[in-house]
Image (cartoon, rainbow, N blue to C red):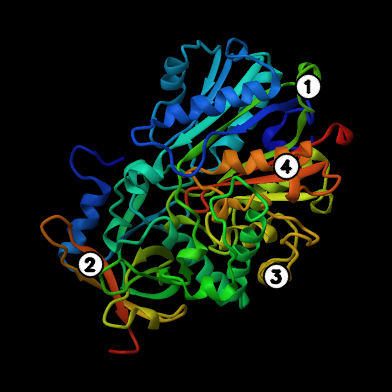
Amino acid sequence: MANANLAGLVRGSVAVVGAAESDLGQVAPNTHPMDIMAQATMRALDDCGLTLKDVDGLFVAATQVRMGPMAFAEYMRIKPRYFDGTIIGGSSFMTHVTHAHAALQLGLCDVALITYGSTQRSVSRAAASPREYNYYEAPYRAFMPPSAYAMAAARHMHQYGTTREQLAAVAVAARKWALMNPKAWEKEPLTIEQVLNARMVSYPFTVRDCCLVLDGGGAIVMTRADRAKALRKKPVYVLGEGESLSHANISSMPDFTVSAAKESGAQAYAMAKMRPSDMQMLSLYDAFTITPLMFLEDLGFCKKGEGGPLVASGAIEPGGKLPVNTSGGGLSYCHPGMYGLLVMIEAIRQIRGECGQRQVKDCNVTLAQGNGGVFSSECTVIFGSEATL
Amino acid sequence: MSSLKEKSPLGVFLDHLAKGELAYQVSLDDNKAFYYPRAVAPGTGSDNLEWRVSKGLGTVYTTTVVHYKGEPPLNVAMIDVDEGFRMMSRVEDIDPMQVKIGMRVKFRVHPGDAKQPPYPVFTPVENK
């Protein structure tokens, strides 16, 4: 059994056939998050040549639409046979891929739509993602989520000698990629010094160690492999999946220097029958500079504690040996609250060869790492071209 | 299981705090301490629980300094309490940037205010 946690899911039995972003950045006043989902949905359906009538599996998670599948089915006036509104933060959509995989394989649906939308820039983050009251954390007024990740970074620095400059290198690499992505929010170059000298948010993070707060969303469409071949675009097959829940509140994270991506990654590699060295491009949820750094360790691209030197070596930048977050990531391209769907869309596009100036050459295998909460839910999806089947 | 109609886990915790005590629970089945307080033991679901009072000593596991606009910098830290549980808190009576990982700290009660019930904070042991 390749993947004990997700036993039964067959490598390559389903594919992503449609993928699209909505308008990103700043939408018009009074735009509803479901307006964004609807726009992305129709773009993703157009991308593959399917229609709204074909959609019979619906997967929705959004902080501003609590009962996502129900509300969006109403908005689109569709009646999905199968639906799922699992919400575990930014990695919700990787989980939706896994759940859609199961549903498609079992015939519970034939065309699965996964969508997300947020207007957090327009309405404020506090309004878009109100926090649940927790007596054991609330009195300390941590700035969440940055302070949680800052405490992980501080522990990593203490234990492994990771430096603020190394963290900043993640933001600088993201910016270099973003300058090659016309859809990226950030348009100006960024230096290590600018990251270090920016406004301090939660030590050791300045505002440049933290992701953007923007409006936006996306959608992807999945079908079984047999049907995928007949559609408009080259299918992008799901080769491996893994998911792991570690905790919900940062106080309960077992080891602040190790994420549950270690478990989700191991599951995904086992299912894909692949190793880290087989991955040609990585889409690693970069809510903060510490997240890709730790994921590189936990997903096996370097030893624990060596993420700092790895990111500072230039390996993850354009021209480096390990392209990471070629879109510009949540740090420089777009971060609309729960960013996992956009994390996957870039990994899908790299396999399709649609990334223009930032395209990774001969890209057949990519890994998308979702992250939710405060290093809380970690979900991995490995995508491959037909050549990898 | 003790009745939730009589007392909640947080209710017991706050009763102890009102007496100046940092209380925590131990699952007697495996003698493991846990925090935050719960109705049953995490991992086993056992209701064979005991409330104990901590000596109030701990070590900073990790720390950050939050910068809210127009406010002085604010410490937030994770404290590994000697009895074997970890909690979020704040280290007071010290420049927030001088709160260091590994620092020994001691519990005291912050009285809270009209909106906020009392809550545990810590102060450096060395500076006493």
Cα distance, mark 1 to mark 4? Answer: 19 Å
Mark 1 vs mark 2: give the one in front.
1
Whether discs 1 and 3 lie on one chain: the answer is yes
**Residue at 39% across / 83% down in the picture?**
B98
Is any atom of residue A85 visible in this view? no
Q: How many marks?
A: 4
- Asked if A259 appears above or below B124 in the picture, the reply is above
Q: Earlier in the sequence, mark 3 or mark 4?
A: 4
Q: Position of residue A162 (x, y in %)?
A: 61, 74
Q: Please, which chain is the residue tagged with disc 2 on?
A: B
**Residue at 32% across / 75% down in the picture?**
B91
Residue at the disc numbered 3: A306
Q: Which mark is residue B21?
A: 2
Mark 2 vs mark 4: give the one in front.
4
Q: Badge 3: few (under 14), some or many (20 or more) residues near its Cα, within 10 Å?
A: some
Cα distance, mark 1 to mark 2? Answer: 61 Å
**Residue at 79% across / 49% down in the picture?**
A360
Give the amino acid at mark 4. Ala
Q: Which mark is residue B96?
A: none
Residue at the disc numbered 1: A225
Q: Badge 2: few (under 14), some or many (20 or more) residues near its Cα, within 10 Å?
A: many
Give the amino acid at mark 1. Ala
Cα distance, mark 3 to mark 2? Answer: 42 Å
Give the amino acid at mark 2. Glu
Give the amino acid at mark 3. Glu
Residue at the disc numbered 4: A268
Q: Position of residue A302 (x, y in %)?
A: 75, 64
